[in-house]
Image (tube, rainbow, N blue to C red):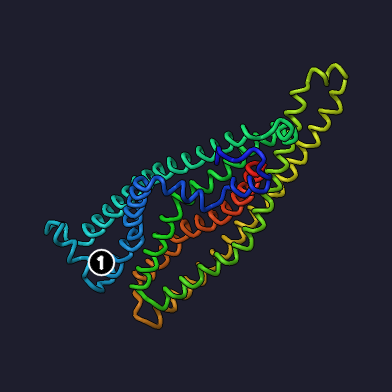
């Protein structure tokens, strides 16, 4: 916001100067460099704790149950007394290590989520202050044409949509990306051909869901617009309630409110079920991919040196990858919804 704009500045100039963009939101985030570095470091630790978990117990299938290899056993022999250097001791130690890593991943994930939440809330707080400052410059005639309901929608509904995206992007994008990168590295170590098949399929899922996500942006904007119209009509009715009652016009105004409420309901239903259908379609695609990879892993055991334990680890990683992939897909939907909210916020800033 610039407080030194000349009084006779044309509206287009003001709108051009006072526009909120993703680049500016990024600059607001970069003001907290120290907190960002700390949160990112904690996110890396959370990833280091979580990525090895699906690999640990399947390794013992080969070395303890099938007697193939002894790399993990040699390491555990340094930690276990002679009396526990047997199957029960090995499995118990690996189970304990798995539990410790899961607890560590949980603690680090909660900590990084808290740090990123503070950053996101501060960014939205600064944007909200900017909108409030903009209200000081809006003429009374423009304010009356906007209506209190529309302004309230910008300051609450649209900023909440933006807040959700910024918070999820800061907290989940890095963790999900690092988790997928770590998983890809382990799969490449086990069997590079199978890993390539798995890694080439995920971008296809993301590409298809981008097209589904574009529809979500339009639906979310329609839903927010209908909410704004209802809020505006409600505010106008409540502001003029005495005149409405004096003129015996309750039926007309309350009937109009009912029509607006029905419009909100219809748009919300349309947005919710279509967004849900898009999410389920992408989930179905991913589930079908898991079935393909399972079959490919079994064939790899049959025709190559992939072991049974490694095959079980691949199965575990297929499910392990679902959470970060779904988070990345949900970020796309949140991005398109936030894009619609950003457009509406800029409409207010441009006045």
- Residue 298 appears left or right of 95: right
- Residue 236 appears left or right of 100: right
- Of the 4 image quadrants, the one containing the C terminus is top right
Query: How dense is the environment of label 1, judged by Cα within 10 Å: few (below 14), some, or many (20 and up)?
Result: some
- Residue 234 appears left or right of 336: right
Residue drawn at 72 percent across, 49 percent down: 270
In the depicted view, which residue is nearer to us: 154 or 248? 154
In the depicted view, which residue is nearer to us: 182 or 115? 115
Task: Look at the picture and state if 275 lies above or below 310.
Answer: above
Q: Where is residue 136 in the image (x, y as percent from the top left)?
A: 61, 32
Q: Residue furthest bottom?
A: 303
Q: Where is residue 189 in the image (x, y as percent from the top left)?
A: 33, 73
Residue drawn at 86 percent across, 28 percent down: 252
- Of the 4 image quadrants, the one containing the N terminus is top right
- Residue that numbered label 1 is attached to: 64
Residue drawn at 61 percent across, 40 percent down: 6
Residue drawn at 51 percent across, 57 percent down: 326
Q: Position of residue 232 (x, y in %)?
A: 73, 33
Task: Look at the picture and state if 180 lies above or below 140.
Answer: below
Q: How many marks?
A: 1
Q: Position of residue 89 (x, y in %)?
A: 21, 57
Residue 231 visible here:
no
Residue 191 visible here:
yes
Secondary structure of residue under mark 1: helix
In the depicted view, which residue is nearer to us: 261 or 221? 221
Task: Look at the picture and state if 210 lies above or below 233.
Answer: below
Q: Which quadrant holds residue 156? A: top right
Q: Which residue lies furthest to the left in this view?
A: 82
């Amino acid at each position: 916001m610039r407080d030194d704009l000349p009084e006779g500045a044309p509206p287009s100039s003001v709108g051009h100067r006072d526009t909120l963009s993703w680049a500016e939101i990024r600059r607001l985030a970069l003001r907290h460099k120290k907190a960002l570095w700390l949160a990112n470091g904690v996110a890396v630790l959370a990833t280091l704790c979580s990525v090895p978990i699906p690999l640990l117990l399947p390794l013992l299938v080969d070395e303890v149950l099938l007697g193939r290899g002894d790399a993990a056993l040699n390491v555990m022999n340094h930690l276990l007394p002679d009396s526990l250097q047997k199957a029960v001791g090995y499995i118990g130690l690996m189970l304990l290590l798995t539990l410790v890593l899961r607890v560590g991943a949980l603690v680090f994930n909660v900590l990084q989520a808290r740090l990123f939440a503070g950053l996101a809330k501060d960014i939205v707080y600064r944007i909200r202050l900017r909108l409030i400052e903009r209200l000081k410059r809006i003429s009374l005639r423009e304010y009356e044409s906007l209506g209190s309901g529309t302004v309230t929608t910008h300051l609450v509904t649209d900023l909440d949509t933006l807040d959700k995206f910024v918070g999820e992007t800061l907290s989940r994008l890095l963790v999900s990306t690092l988790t997928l990168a770590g998983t890809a590295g382990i799969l490449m170590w086990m069997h590079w051909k199978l890993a390539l098949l798995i890694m080439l399929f995920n971008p296809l899922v993301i590409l298809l869901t981008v097209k589904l996500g574009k529809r979500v942006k339009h639906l979310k904007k329609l839903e927010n617009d209908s909410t704004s119209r209802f809020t505006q009509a409600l505010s106008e009715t409540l502001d003029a309630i005495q005149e409405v009652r004096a003129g015996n016009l309750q039926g007309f105004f309350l009937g109009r409110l009912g029509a607006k409420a029905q419009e909100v309901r219809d748009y919300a239903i349309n947005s919710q079920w279509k967004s849900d259908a898009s999410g389920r379609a992408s989930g179905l695609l991913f589930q079908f991919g898991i079935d393909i990879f399972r079959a490919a892993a079994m064939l790899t055991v049959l025709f190559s040196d992939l072991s049974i334990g490694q095959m079980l680890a691949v199965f575990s990683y297929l499910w392990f990858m679902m959470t970060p992939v779904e988070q990345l897909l949900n970020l796309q939907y949140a991005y398109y919804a936030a894009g619609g909210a950003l457009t509406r916020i800029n409409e207010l800033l441009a006045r």
